[in-house]
Every structure is written in structure tokens, then in C-alpha cells.
Image (cartoon, helix red, strand yellow):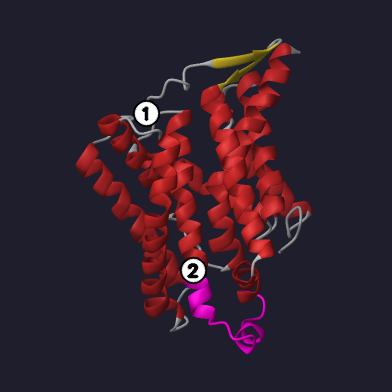
Amino acid sequence: MDLFVNAIVAGILLGAFYAAVSVGLSISFGQLDIVNIAHPAFVIVGSYIAWILNSRYGLDPVLVGVLAAPIFFIVGALIYRIYYAAFERTGQESLSGLAFFFGVMFIIEVVLILVYGVDYRLVSAGYLSKNVDLGFVGLPLRLVVPFLVASAMTGAVWLYLSRTFTGRAILAVAQDRLALQLMGADPVRIKQFAFGLAIATTAIAGALLIMIGPVEPSLGRVYIGRAFAIVVLGGMGSIPGMVIAALLIGVLESLVSSFAGPSWAPAVAFGALLITLAVRPSGLFGRA
């Protein structure tokens, strides 16, 4: 029973981090219909930036992620302009756009390998090695702090999308482009802003990732299938559904790792995705 409860708690903490990784993809893929398979690669870039500034200047990883987010936003906005001019404007975004983001992912991974090698990198902070014990439940701060930061970031993104004009315009741009234009909004600018916001979240998610465990350039591949599975499982573009799906995947992976072995954990996300597509293809909450 002790092992079971600790696995559940660890799964919830891990699930919140999965939500932080997936929230940007829920915007770009779930709401803008942009299949950005390079999304986890940007998370890894965020991890390396956190590692560089932490190892050289002793900056806290969370602070680095927050400071890097505006830069990631600008990069995301520029990438969307290239994507729009080359593919979306000409109606070639389906296959050619997918190849474009595959190329972006490949370039990021190769550059990181050439510059920093394939060694695992890890950040240091005084609180990362400490635990908080609540009876027989152990709460490692290396999971608790990412849980709190991930919850705050995901909640802030959801509030922005649901409470502001720009946020509601992002939700509307994939549903009724003409109606959005009649309201005086430029769909291209709205999508550019939304894609920049999606990439900005990867800066913070990357900082949280390297707090949880060591990172190397190809680690992003592990999160491609997991992040897409969470977005589809929760319902395309639904932030609350994505959060519930992330927590579900986190708990299931933790239980499987504890009782069946870590090698079985990666299959959880794909298994849950296949079951969901067979029983409820629209996901837990349907499309936003």
C-alpha cells in the first residue's frame, strides 16, 4: 500500500510536468492545426539554456526559464512567419509543413550534439536534493517544485486563452476564420502570436525537465509521442482536458514503473491513446 500511494503521488507530480510540456502543443497542434513535431526539441533547448546559466552563473533554473520565455516567443513568431510564407499561404502545410518541422527538430538536435556532445547534463540547486516526508509519503522537491511551476504556467495560459480577447481569438482562429476577420482581427497575426506563445512555454518546460533528471540532445524524441498522445487524449485544443490526460498518463506511468518495471512505462501513453481513439475519438473533452 505504501508503494502504491507513493506511486500515485509521484504520478500526479510528474503529470503536472507533462502538462507543462504539452500545453504549447495543445495550442499549436490542437488549436492551430500545426503539426509541430519539433516542439519537444525546443523543450530540450530550454533545458540546455537552464544548464548553461546555472552552471556558469548559478542562476536558478526556474528563473532562467522565465527569463528565456520572451526570447523563445520571438523565435516562435519568426518560425511561424517562415512556415506561413513557405507552406500555409500556398496550401502545402500538410506534408511539407510536417517535413519542415522535422527538419527544425533535426537541426536543433545536431547542433546541440556538435556543440555540447552526447553527455547528460544536470542543474544544481540547494533544494533539488531535499525531500518532504508526509508520513509514509515522500515528496522529493525535484518533483514538487516543477509541479508547482508547471501548474502555475498551465493555469496562466488557460486563463489567458479563456479571459482575454487575444486568447479567445486564438481559440476562434481555427474554427471560423471569416468571423474573426469580421471582428477586425488578422488571423495570420493571431496565429503568429499563438505559435510564439506555444514556443515560449517550452523555455519553462525545459527548465523543469532538467530539474527532474539529466538531459541529453536526443531526449526530445521520447516526448514526441507522449505529448501528442496527451493532446489527443484530452481533446484537441482543450487545456482542461489536456491537464487531466497528462495527470492520467503520469499516474499510469508511475504505477507501471513501480509494479511492472520502467521499461514498460513508455507504452502507457500510446496504449491510452489507442484505447481513447477506439472508444472516444474526440478525446476526453472533445475539440475546444
Above or below 195: residue 219 = above
Task: Say left or right for 187 vs 84.
Answer: right
| Residues in magenta, as a range | 174-193
Q: Amino acid at mark 1?
A: Val
Across and down, in percent, residue 207 comes to 43, 39
Q: What residue is disc 2 on?
A: 193
Q: Amino acid at mark 2?
A: Phe
Would you say residue 45 sits in the magenta stretch? no
Residue drawn at 67 percent across, 22 percent down: 7
C-alpha separation, residue under disc 1 versus residue under disc 2: 31 Å
Across and down, in percent, residue 266 comes to 56, 35
* Quadrant position of residue 159: bottom right
The earlier-in-sequence mark between 1 and 2 is 1
* Quadrant position of residue 96: bottom left
Would you say residue 179 sits in the magenta stretch? yes
> Can residue 41 be seen at all in this image of the molecule?
no
Task: Say left or right for 140 vs 70.
Answer: right
As drawn, the residue found furthest toward the top would be 135
Across and down, in percent, residue 143 comes to 55, 28
Above or below 212: residue 3 = above
Q: Residues within 10 Å of mark 1 (few under 14, many from 20)?
A: many
